[in-house]
Image (cartoon, coloured by chain):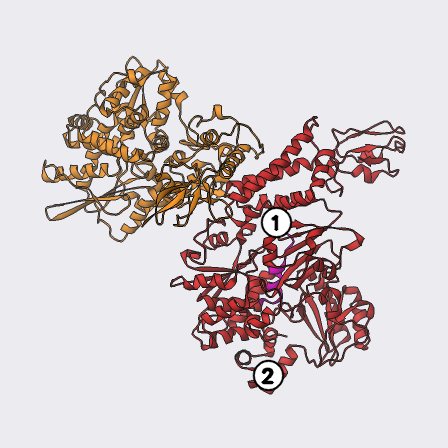
């Protein structure tokens, strides 16, 4: 039901059941917010979105107040502006004054608010007890002194990721956001997905960028630096640089990386092809039981912590990123006494954690030497004074040069599942392609399903993303083992295109666009199916010749302690 | 006297039947339980928190020893607190046929004195406080009656009429005083709508603070369709200076349960949570014991008194923070979450505990219900004002001559409360202000004393009655310090969710700390800076009130604002003259040694904890101002009054 409400003496349309804020947004009236998150129940904690409603004594929070027909709203009166400015001043009163040195300088929502509300003087100054940075996690740094307690990280960690690693603690002026039990982040249930970093408005949560290490490695003549680049990385940088030609953009990134000092640049999508082929092989061999995907490191940590009984069902295959590390370290010959140094460029912060797992770090020889996120890469390009616009297109290097459509789709939720299904169909039918028009949404959420029949047997594949949703889905399935043959789980909602290591752009449509872009890009690929990727055939035959070559592709899991 | 005197069946008969249908033996039993009749002397020692603090347990054992030593035939028992904090612990003595006399304070040493006298039927007059009026008893000569004591004569004791008389741990004594009759009458003879209608007619308003009409709140929950509805009895009182809710729980817990049961029936809730303050174990123990007694009599549980009404009552101990008393925070806490308030609407009466319609009523509100049902709404409206009928129980504390739990009719002036009931300021000091409503309340000065206690009048004057804590301040209180005390409470007890309350109260506290402390380094523009702070204080307070999420934040700056308005000159003295006229803010004082008076005895220099006093023996000493922390030890030490302040 639609009706009109008066806002600033103007009539705007409102829909019954929505909040004042939603109606205002549609009408193009911008209201500052801090704690508000699209798609979450409003908490009304920050009090920045306060508006005047005629007949109400105090100001009303527009984020949580439903619109009603009688309402007369004023959004920018002196009283409202004064309140908003005072709130920002209060936040700044106890906020450290080190914007210049802050990780989020120029990308900080608090900074923007102070600018928008014209805060030009430190009217208040208050002291908070000194707080120590939590550097324990291999992926994420927590700086509580920068925290303004908006609670966005707490909500995403609990409601979307189902981890509850971050929690409010204390009360009154001693309230803070802390890890569970006040331990270091690495000792908690944190799965390093980085979603908290994505929602943090300030520099209270940020990833460990490792740019200095990258710089040193690239300048070391004893090393042979090579890069593996996820298609989502080039896609997100294309967003940043405003580049419309995505294929071109990916090739230009290769050039940029070479200019930075990488000797070779490889395509992550080619490794995804390898991953898909080996998974399908495993699947056709397995007798009727469900196999879960293993390419998302955050999901693996979650399963080790919360679902240890599920571990035997999870594919033992290494993730494409680690496959790249293993294979490159084996295949790259030592040239002039230089050691290969493998850097993985990823949209993911959990890869940083994954690369530090014990099994991927045989003594002195890590498989992946460094993981750099898209966000850090963006900064590295600037740091090295390179102009992306002048980069020439350059192909990936062999052996991971070409990839298939399905390989490229690995970054979007459902992509791996679809690829594995197509590959399985190919294997079962002895070389037939899966008929197109295949994906089916099972539920309104982020669960998708693909079904085909073969030889009187129904093969069901499912994909789910968002850890909390996935956990619910898995619990529902506990009653019917083997119903699905393959389940792809991705920790971040919508998959790697929403990864925790992507540039923070504050654009509501970014996710939809990225999904569309990646699908369009992949569908233009000449190679439809992973099976058609010949380079993988060559690689596999080479591996077969090697002693214990197959073994290189597999890993093991151990039940972890749940904190 | 305990339930052994009355078996389960008798108790149930007495509750369910009108007095005319009760047998002769049962009526005799009731007379005994009400202490209208006694066959052997009865000695009752008061049992309440103030009594315990004053040593009532020692008195009790002293009396027990006396009785066994002298081999007396005496009934020794307990009675609830009398709501009069002076002269605790009280001992009530009742001889057969004579009226009941209260003695106090009775320390173990004077127990023999009193009891010797009583055995000889002679009252030791110096310890006797008052006697209770009872037409069946012969009064003592020379002992004033209870209602002649000024502290009690100013009150209207309706709800609290049994306080100090019966044993809170005995359901039998409660039943003897018409207990549970209203509830059983309600579930057997009335529909839920009837009860709501009666409460509507009585004009009962919620005693939690805002004074929202109780029947209206119920009506919303009644009209919301749901398979399950909940009632929460909010007894999580944790304001500094308030003890009414705890007192109700510990003095007549059965009346609380009866009120709870009636309200549950009226709104159609089969599940009730009594949410108590976990930090007060005594009142919690009392209500817990009472709940088990009520359950044993079948007053809770399935199919109560064959009416078909089921009721489950669960006692929940709060998480212990002040904010737990806010209804949405309370609901969050009951659901096992962190106790933080949430934005309303939706209101709990529509969507509360586990998303179901939930009525949250204050314990005092529910305490009114049995009387309304027993005596009718018109009787209830006879007391109080048309807008706020009935009586209000207040915690009267501070610099008064008499303090304690008082019950006053709405419409009484604050002046009467202070001078008549409280007996005025003690030690002949001057009245300065009255702080009402706990940390969320405000200060009222001389001119406000004419105000009548009434929800409407108070709302018009912008005062929040809150939990009913009244703290009276005299000239020895510094108003800046009072404001600072309450603000510190708020800034510690704020839940920390919304920015204006969390950061704003911390900031306001910073400003008050700055003006009541000595500056670190006195720059010339420093007083100006502090004055600027006070200007900020006002605009800060305005924004905090305008934008905070819950009632705590919305009223947090009230104490500061009201003191700032009423006692602005005190603030200015603190800022410009660095002077605290009450001498409370010791940090503002500068200590110095009078050269004339100092003999150079070195005593002060030896005691100074920070070595701020230097000098040569037998020469005048000197205090280094920068080092001095203003502790005042030197002043206490000096035998020649040479240490002075300015």
Earlier sequence position, callout 2 versus callout 1: 2
**Magenta span includes B188:** no
Colour assigned to chain B in the rendering is red
For this view, does B134 lie left or right of residue B256? right
* A170 over B72 or under it: above or below: above
For this view, does A105 lie left or right of residue B400? left
- Residue on which disc 1 sits: B439
| Figure quadrant of residue B180 | bottom right
Mark 2 falls on what kind of element?
helix
Q: Which residues are magenta?
A: B239-253
**Magenta span includes B247:** yes
Colour assigned to chain A in the rendering is orange
Res. A174 visible in picture:
no
* A303 over B76 or under it: above or below: above
Q: Residues within 10 Å of mark 2 (few under 14, many from 20)?
A: some
Q: Chain of mark 1?
A: B
Q: Nearer the viewer, residue A82 or B602?
A: A82
Looking at the image, the residue that sits furthest to the front is A9
- Residue on which disc 2 sits: B26
Residue A239 position, x and y percent, is 30, 27
Q: CA distance from mark 2 to mark 1?
A: 49 Å
Which dot marks residue A471?
A: none
Looking at the image, the residue that sits furthest to the bottom is B24
The mark closer to the camera, 2 or 1, is 1
Res. B229 visible in picture:
yes
Q: Assign the C terminus of chain B to one quadrant of the image.
A: top right
| Figure quadrant of residue A316 | top left
For this view, does A273 lie left or right of residue B3? left
């Amino acid at each position: 039901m639609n009706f009109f409400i008066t806002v600033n003496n103007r009539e705007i349309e409102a829909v019954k059941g929505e909040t004042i804020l939603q109606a205002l947004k549609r009408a193009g009236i911008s209201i500052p917010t801090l704690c508000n998150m699209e798609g979450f129940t409003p908490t009304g904690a920050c009090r920045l979105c306060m508006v005047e409603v005629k007949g109400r004594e105090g100001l009303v929070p527009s984020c949580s107040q439903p619109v009603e027909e009688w309402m007369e709203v004023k959004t920018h009166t002196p009283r409202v502006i004064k309140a908003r400015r005072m709130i920002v001043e209060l936040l700044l009163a106890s906020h450290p004054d080190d914007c210049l040195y802050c990780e989020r300088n120029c990308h900080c929502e608090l900074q923007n608010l102070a600018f928008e509300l014209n805060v030009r003087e430190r009217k208040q100054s208050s002291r908070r007890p000194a707080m120590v940075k939590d550097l324990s996690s291999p992926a994420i740094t927590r700086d509580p002194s920068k925290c303004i307690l908006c609670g966005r990280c707490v909500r995403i960690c609990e409601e979307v990721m189902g981890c509850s690693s971050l929690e409010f603690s204390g009360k009154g002026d001693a309230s803070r956001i802390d890890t569970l039990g006040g331990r270091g982040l690495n000792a908690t249930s944190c799965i390093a997905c980085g979603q908290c970093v994505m929602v943090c408005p300030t520099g209270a949560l940020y990833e460990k960028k490792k740019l200095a290490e990258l710089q040193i490695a690239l300048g070391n003549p004893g090393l042979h630096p090579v890069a593996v680049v996820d298609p989502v990385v080039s896609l997100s940088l294309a967003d940043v640089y405003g580049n419309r030609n995505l294929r071109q953009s990916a090739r230009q990134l290769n050039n940029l990386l070479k200019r930075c000092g990488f000797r070779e640049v490889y395509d992550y999508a080619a490794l995804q092809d390898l991953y898909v082929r080996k998974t399908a092989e495993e699947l056709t061999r397995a007798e009727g039981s469900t196999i879960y995907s293993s390419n998302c490191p955050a999901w693996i940590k979650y399963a080790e912590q919360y679902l240890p009984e599920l571990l035997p069902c999870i594919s033992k295959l290494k993730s494409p990123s680690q496959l790249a590390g293993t294979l490159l370290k084996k295949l790259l010959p030592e040239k002039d006494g230089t050691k290969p140094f493998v850097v993985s460029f990823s949209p993911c912060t959990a890869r940083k954690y994954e690369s530090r797992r014990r099994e991927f770090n045989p003594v002195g020889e890590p498989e992946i030497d460094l993981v750099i996120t898209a966000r850090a890469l963006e900064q590295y390009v600037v740091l090295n004074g390179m102009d992306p616009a002048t980069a020439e297109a350059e192909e990936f290097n062999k052996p991971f040069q070409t990839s298939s459509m399905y390989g490229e789709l690995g970054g979007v939720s459902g992509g791996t599942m679809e690829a594995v299904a197509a590959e399985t169909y190919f294997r079962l039918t002895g070389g037939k392609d899966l008929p197109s028009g295949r994906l089916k949404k099972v539920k309104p959420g982020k669960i998708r399903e693909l079904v085909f029949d073969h030889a009187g047997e129904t093969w069901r594949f499912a994909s789910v993303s968002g850890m909390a949703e996935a956990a619910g889905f898995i619990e529902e399935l506990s009653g019917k083992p083997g119903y699905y043959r393959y389940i792809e789980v991705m920790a971040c909602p919508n998959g790697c295109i929403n990864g925790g290591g992507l540039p923070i752009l504050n654009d509501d449509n970014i996710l939809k666009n990225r999904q569309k872009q990646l699908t369009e890009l992949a569908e233009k690929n000449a190679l439809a199916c992973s099976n058609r990727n010949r380079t993988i055939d060559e690689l596999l035959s080479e591996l077969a010749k090697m002693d214990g070559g197959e073994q290189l592709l597999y890993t093991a899991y151990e039940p972890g302690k749940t904190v | 006297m305990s339930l052994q005197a009355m078996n389960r069946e008798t108790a149930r008969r007495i509750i369910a039947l009108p007095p005319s249908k009760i047998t002769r033996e049962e009526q005799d039993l009731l007379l005994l339980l009400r202490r209208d009749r006694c066959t052997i002397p009865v000695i009752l020692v008061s049992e309440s928190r103030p009594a315990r603090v004053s040593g009532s347990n020692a008195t009790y054992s002293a009396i027990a020893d006396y009785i066994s030593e002298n081999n007396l035939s005496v009934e020794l028992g307990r009675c609830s607190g009398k709501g009069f904090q002076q002269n605790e612990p009280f001992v009530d003595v009742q001889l057969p046929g004579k009226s009941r006399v209260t003695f106090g304070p009775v320390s173990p040493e004077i127990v023999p004195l009193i009891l010797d006298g009583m055995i000889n039927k002679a009252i030791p007059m110096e310890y006797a406080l008052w006697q209770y009026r009872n037409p069946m008893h012969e009064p003592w000569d020379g002992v004033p009656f209870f209602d002649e004591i000024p502290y009690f004569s100013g009150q209207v004791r309706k709800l609290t009429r049994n306080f100090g008389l019966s044993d809170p741990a005995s359901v039998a004594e409660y039943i003897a005083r018409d207990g549970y009759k209203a509830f059983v009458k309600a579930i057997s003879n009335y529909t839920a709508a009837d009860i709501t209608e009666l409460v509507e007619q009585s004009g009962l308003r919620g005693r939690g603070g805002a004074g929202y009409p109780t029947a209206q709140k119920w009506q919303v929950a009644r009209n919301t369709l749901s398979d399950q509805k909940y009632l929460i009895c909010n007894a999580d009182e944790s304001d500094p200076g308030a003890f009414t809710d705890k007192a109700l729980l510990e003095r007549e817990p059965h009346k609380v349960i009866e009120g709870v049961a009636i309200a549950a029936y009226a709104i159609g809730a089969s599940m009730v949570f009594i949410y108590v303050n976990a930090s007060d174990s005594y009142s919690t123990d009392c209500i817990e014991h009472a709940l088990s007694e009520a359950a044993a009599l079948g007053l809770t549980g399935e199919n109560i008194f064959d009416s078909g009404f089921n009721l489950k009552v669960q006692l929940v101990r709060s998480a212990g923070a002040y904010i737990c008393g806010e209804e949405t925070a309370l609901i969050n806490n009951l659901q096992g979450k962190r106790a933080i308030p949430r934005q309303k609407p939706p209101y709990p009466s529509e969507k509360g505990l586990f998303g179901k319609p939930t009525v949250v009523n204050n314990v005092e509100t529910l305490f009114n219900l049995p009387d309304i049902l027993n005596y009718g709404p018109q009787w209830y409206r006879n007391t109080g004002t048309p807008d706020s009928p009935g009586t209000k129980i207040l915690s009267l504390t501070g610099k008064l001559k008499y303090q304690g739990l008082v019950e006053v009719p709405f419409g009484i002036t604050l002046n009467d409360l202070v001078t008549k009931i409280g007996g005025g300021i003690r030690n002949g000091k001057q009245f300065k202000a009255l702080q009402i409503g706990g940390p969320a309340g405000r200060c009222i000065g001389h001119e406000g004393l004419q105000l009548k206690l009434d929800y409407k009048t108070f709302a018009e004057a912008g005062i929040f009655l809150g939990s009913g804590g009244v703290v009276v301040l005299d000239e020895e209180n510094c108003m800046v310090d009072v404001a600072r005390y309450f603000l510190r409470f708020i800034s510690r007890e704020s839940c920390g969710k919304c920015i204006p309350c969390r950061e704003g109260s911390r900031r306001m506290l910073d400003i008050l700390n700055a003006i009541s402390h000595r500056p670190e380094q006195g720059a010339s523009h420093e007083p100006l800076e502090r004055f600027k702070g006070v200007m900020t204080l006002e605009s800060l307070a305005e924004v905090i009130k305008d934008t905070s999420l819950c009632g705590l934040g919305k009223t947090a700056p009230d104490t500061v604002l009201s003191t700032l308005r009423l006692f602005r000159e005190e603030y200015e003295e603190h800022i410009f003259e660095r002077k605290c006229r009450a001498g409370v803010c010791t940090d503002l004082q500068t200590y110095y040694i009078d050269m004339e008076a100092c003999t150079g005895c070195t005593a002060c220099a030896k005691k100074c904890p920070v070595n701020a006093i230097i000098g040569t023996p037998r020469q005048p000493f000197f205090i280094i101002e920068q080092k001095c922390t203003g502790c005042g030890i030197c002043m206490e030490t000096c035998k020649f009054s040479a240490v002075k302040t300015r």
